[in-house]
Amino acid sequence: MPIYEYRCKDCGRKVTLSYRTYAEYDEATPTCTYCGSANLVRLISRVAIVRSEEARLSALEDMAAGADLDDADPRTLGRLMREMSRELGEDLGDEFDEVVSRLEAGESPESIEKSMPDLAEPSEQGDVE
Ligand SMILES: [Zn+2]
């Protein structure tokens, strides 16, 4: 389910709108849920700017939270990650593919994160001997 955030230029509030499909998003005119204004500015979602390797699992968690899937099984999370990848329209790399594949095989995110420490550590820090 696509979820987008907007800033209302009339009342200044942040508006979160969700759509059932991408087609519905394409056709919809977003309006402020507080004041009804159509004068909204699309905010770049955290999902869209979270592209770095170490943040991919965080993005997954954000998506899962946004989709209200607290007790989602790994297969559902894997599917969400594929959708996220498709929305970004870019190749997120072999590690991302591996994570998605393992989720879809039913492995827990915690287990995957543990076995792929690169995903949890900022790459800029370099190796610590
Ligand atoms: Zn408003």
Image (tube, rainbow, N blue to C red):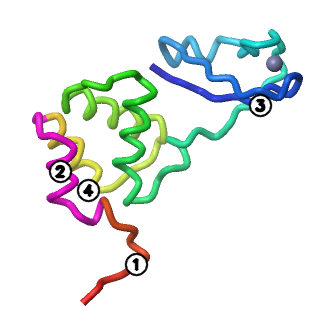
Which amino acid, mark 1? Gln
> What residue do we see at 19% from left, 27% from top?
73
Which is closer to the viewer, label 2 or label 4?
Answer: 2
User: Which comes sooner in the sequence, label 1 or label 2?
Assistant: 2
User: Which comes sooner in the sequence, label 1 or label 3?
Assistant: 3
Q: Which mark is residue 104?
A: none
Mark 4 crowd level (few <14, some 14–19, many ≥20, 10 Å Cα)? some
Q: How many numbered circles does the render carry?
A: 4
Residue 75 drawn at (x, y percent): 19, 29
Q: Is residue 108 magenta?
A: yes
Which residue is disc 3 drawn over? 41
Depth check, front residue: 51 or 7: 7
Judge whether 78 appears above or below 17 on screen: below
Which residue is disc 1 drawn over? 125
Q: Quadrant of residue 29?
A: top right
Whereabouts is ligand 1, in terms of quadrant?
A: top right
Q: Which residues are magenta?
A: 105-119
Residue 70 drawn at (x, y percent): 31, 26
